[in-house]
């Protein structure tokens, strides 16, 4: 009676434990099966009591055979190890088992106790950690390989860039040397060509002053010689100016000049030129134009001469107008707004931008009436932009043209 009471108390205590506790007798018949065992292996106490332990719990995954486990327990008193179990269909669980020898002579108990605690979650976490570590190592390896490839490409690009930079350095050196040679050549050829041209123009002008030579064919021929010389000199000047612009050697100078006197002289010259061509010339200079301005009067003169020369050249009858306004834009800056209008042949709208391109001419036929190189307007716009302004065109074929030229000059403080 006492034996049964003690055993019942022990079995009730086992039921309260979270760990699996299974006891068997010497023949492995199950004597107790606690609630944790029911939950872990899905067999009830009623199904297991009195039946063989190995029918319900498999130790096939144990590191040593089951009989060797029991023999170890008999000799040493205990044995423990981790074992994986197939607890349900397609579900595995991991337990740490401790097997003990249970022998109480006074209670007539001789058998074994199988105690286990579930480490499935820990194993799953370890497996997840191992998998994550493996994935990380794989990603690190892939990234390392990718970085090596990127590094190799960068190294190749750096080497290529060094090669290109070296080629550019050599090319730049050659270009700079060529520019020096070109500059030297232009300077030399400028003198060599201008000198004989000045002789031709000067001597033909002197001869034309002789009344007898001006008559008939000789006078006509002398005028052709002088006109051709002047045209050739204009071409040389335009080419040299463009060359200086492209090389950055032509820069505006800030010099004081008398603005009203500048425009009075300009208008006087074109008053005579238009009268010789039987054209009406009308000009209007802003009364508010400051007396003294700081800027490059030479560049201003070149732009206005080009626009006025074109207006006269391309107008066979009618008029040429020059309007000059000054606008104070602050900080002692004055914007000159010059408009040159004519009643000449006009320019088709589709040609408006093209005429500012180098060597472009609206009439490109071999028998064209109006001679020229196509450099004048290119140079004029470049000079205007150099002075902080621009040139715009309004024109239509057979309706004349209006060129609007702006530039910025500084008012000279008294």
Image: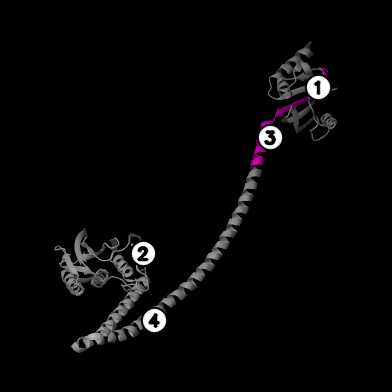
**At 34% from the left edge and 84% from the top edge, which residue is drawn?**
193
Image coordinates for residue 49, horizontal then vertical, percent = 79, 17
**At 78% from the left edge and 26% from the top edge, which residue is drawn?**
57
Rendered image quadrant of residue 37: top right
In primary-sequence order, the first of circles 3 and 4 is: 3
- Tag 4 residue: 185
Badge 1 element: strand
Q: Quadrant of the N terminus?
A: top right
- Tag 3 residue: 123
Q: Are marks 3 and 2 in contact (CB under 8 Å)?
A: no
Badge 2 element: helix
Q: Is residue 248 or residue 85 the one in the foreground?
A: 248
In primary-sequence order, the first of circles 1 and 3 is: 1
**Left or right: 372 as drawn, with respect to 45:** left
- Of all residues shown, which one is farthest toward the top? 1
**Magenta stretch?**
103-132
In primary-sequence order, the first of circles 2 and 1 is: 1
- Tag 2 residue: 354
Q: Is residue 352 above or below residue 38?
A: below
Badge 3 element: helix
**Left or right: 349 as drawn, with respect to 170:** left
**At 78% from the left edge and 13% from the top edge, which residue is drawn?**
4
- Tag 1 residue: 24
Q: Which mark is residue 282?
A: none
Q: Are marks 1 and 4 in contact (CB under 8 Å)?
A: no
In primary-sequence order, the first of circles 3 and 2 is: 3
Q: Quadrant of the C terminus?
A: bottom left
Is 178 included in the stretch rendered in magenta?
no
Q: Is residue 393 or residue 46 the one in the foreground?
A: 393
Q: Nearer the viewer, mark 2 or mark 1?
A: 2
In primary-sequence order, the first of circles 4 and 2 is: 4
């Amino acid at each position: 009676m006492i034996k049964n009471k003690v055993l019942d108390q022990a079995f009730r205590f086992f039921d309260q434990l979270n760990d699996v506790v299974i006891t068997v007798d010497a023949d492995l018949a199950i004597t107790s099966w606690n609630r944790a065992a029911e939950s872990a292996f899905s067999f009830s106490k009623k199904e297991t009591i009195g039946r063989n332990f190995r029918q319900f719990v498999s130790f096939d995954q144990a590191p040593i055979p089951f009989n060797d486990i029991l023999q170890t327990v008999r000799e040493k008193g205990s044995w423990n190890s981790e074992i994986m179990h197939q607890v349900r269909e397609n579900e595995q669980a991991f337990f740490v088992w401790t097997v003990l020898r249970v022998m109480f002579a006074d209670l007539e108990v001789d058998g074994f106790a199988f105690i286990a605690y579930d480490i499935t979650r820990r194993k799953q976490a370890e497996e997840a950690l191992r998998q994550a570590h493996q994935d990380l190592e794989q990603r690190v390896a892939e990234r390392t390989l990718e970085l090596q490839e990127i590094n190799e490409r960068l190294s190749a690009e750096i080497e290529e860039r060094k090669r290109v930079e070296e080629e550019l350095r050599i090319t730049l050196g050659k270009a700079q040397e060529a520019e020096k040679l070109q500059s030297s050549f232009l300077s030399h050829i400028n003198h060599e060509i201008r000198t004989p041209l000045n002789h031709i123009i000067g001597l033909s002008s002197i001869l034309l002053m002789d009344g007898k030579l001006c008559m008939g064919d000789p006078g006509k021929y002398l005028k052709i010689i002088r006109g051709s010389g002047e045209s050739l000199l204009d071409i040389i000047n335009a080419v040299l100016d463009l060359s200086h612009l492209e090389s950055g050697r032509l820069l505006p100078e800030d010099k004081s000049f008398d603005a009203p006197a500048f425009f009075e002289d300009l208008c006087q010259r074109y008053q005579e030129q238009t009268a010789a061509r039987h054209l009406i010339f009308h000009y209007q200079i802003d009364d508010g134009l400051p007396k003294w301005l700081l800027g490059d009067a030479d560049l201003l003169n070149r732009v206005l001469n080009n626009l006025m020369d074109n207006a006269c050249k391309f107008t066979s009858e009618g008029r040429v107008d020059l309007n000059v306004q000054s606008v104070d834009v602050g900080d002692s800056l004055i914007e000159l707004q010059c408009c040159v209008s004519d009643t000449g042949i006009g320019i088709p709208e589709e040609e408006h931008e093209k005429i500012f391109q180098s060597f472009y001419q609206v009439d490109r036929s071999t028998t064209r009436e109006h001679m020229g190189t196509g450099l004048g307007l290119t140079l004029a716009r470049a000079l205007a932009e150099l002075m902080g302004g621009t040139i715009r065109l309004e024109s239509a074929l057979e309706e004349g043209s209006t060129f609007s030229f702006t530039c910025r000059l500084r008012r000279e403080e008294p």
